[in-house]
Image (cartoon, helix red, strand yellow):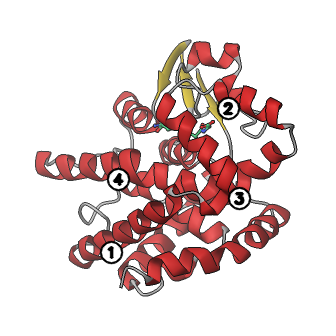
Amino acid sequence: MLELYTNPMSPCAQKVRIVLAEKGLDWTKHHVDLSQKENLEPQYLKLNPLGVVPTLVHDNKPIIESSIICEYLNDTFPENNLKPEDTYEISKMRYWMKHVDNKLHPSCGALQWPLIMRPSLMEKTEEERQTLLDKIPEKPRRERQKRLVKFGLDAPDVVDSVITYRKTILDMEAALKQQKWIVSNNFCLADICLAPYFQTILQFGWTKMYEDCPHVFNWFLRCRERASYQNAVANDFSLAVQADLLAKGKPAWEKIKTHIEKMT
Ligand SMILES: N[C@@H](CCC(=O)N[C@@H](CS)C(=O)NCC(=O)O)C(=O)O
């Protein structure tokens, strides 16, 4: 019995849903409303003490951290293996997954938060907002979210995040010149862990971030063409949601673009 605590907008949860779809596994969905901070409710914190989505529950055992969940699912359900056989390739796969967890994911959060989470938090009183944000268990994440709520896209975290995104794209372009997928000619967990971060770019209409990198462009097209991506990610974005996200992303592009231009 597999249960997933998830939110459609979360790239970490999207990774796990892609793996579940690649494996053809049945699972039960528990929607966690991040805008209402359901992730910080005591019931949820018992499952995931970090107060983040996703959480997988397999036969009543909670598993947290999206990359660990992806590898757990791959190793527990071996049909349609998504890990290379070669140990050097496994090390490359883990390198990309670690890069996503440590660098790309926080950068994505710094760009998504001001546009998606901030508006609903700004509808609350200052006191309500602080009470909610004070519940975030880890200090660096709590302080960062406070900055992003206070300053939006003008928060100091945003410049570094755009630079990290762009550098990741350039590194991926170099890797994808050598082979079809990010680690080898076989699709693997590293491709799955990277792809949702391009969904974020797409949903806000910021594809100019990678349009000058044809290998990355074609890689993401190939990811999106997979049935797993359609089922696990694309189908969660109705036309109305897509229009809303594009409308939020459009005015922000000018700021994002300025940070990219300063790199060259
Ligand atoms: N390292 C964690 C990160 C999870 C994470 O940051 N999830 C975000 C959504 S993508 C979240 O739940 N944010 C809620 C919050 O920070 O309040 C993982 O890979 O599972």
Identify residue for label 1: 170
Q: Label 2 to label 1, Cα distance in Å? A: 35 Å
Q: At 74% from the left edge and 71% from the top edge, which residue is drawn?
A: 246
Work out whether residue 179 or residue 122 is closer to the camera in this orientation and state it.
122
* In-image side of 191 versus 200 (left or right): left
Identify residue for label 3: 115
Mark closer to the observer (4, 2): 2
Q: At 54% from the left edge and 69% from the top edge, which residue is drawn?
A: 225
* In-image side of 122 versus 39 (left or right): right
Q: Is residue 259 above or below residue 47?
A: below
Report ligand 1 position as a quadrant. Answer: top right
The reply to whether callout 4 and callout 2 are in contact (CB within 8 Å) is no
Q: At 47% from the left edge and 67% from the top edge, which residue is drawn?
A: 162
How dense is the environment of label 4, judged by Cα within 10 Å: few (below 14), some, or many (20 and up)? many
Residue type of the residue flagged with mark 3: Leu
Mark closer to the observer (1, 3): 3
Query: Residue 185: percent from the left, percent from the top?
Result: 26, 66
How dense is the environment of label 1, judged by Cα within 10 Å: few (below 14), some, or many (20 and up)? some
Identify residue for label 4: 190
Identify residue for label 2: 133
Q: At 81% from the left edge and 30% from the top edge, which residue is drawn?
A: 127
Mark closer to the observer (3, 2): 2
Answer with mark 1 or mark 4, whichever residue precedes in sequence: 1
How dense is the environment of label 3, judged by Cα within 10 Å: few (below 14), some, or many (20 and up)? some
How dense is the environment of label 2, judged by Cα within 10 Å: few (below 14), some, or many (20 and up)? some
Query: Residue 242: percent from the left, percent from the top?
Result: 76, 66
Q: Label 3 to label 2, Cα distance in Å? A: 17 Å
Answer with mark 2 or mark 1, whichever residue precedes in sequence: 2
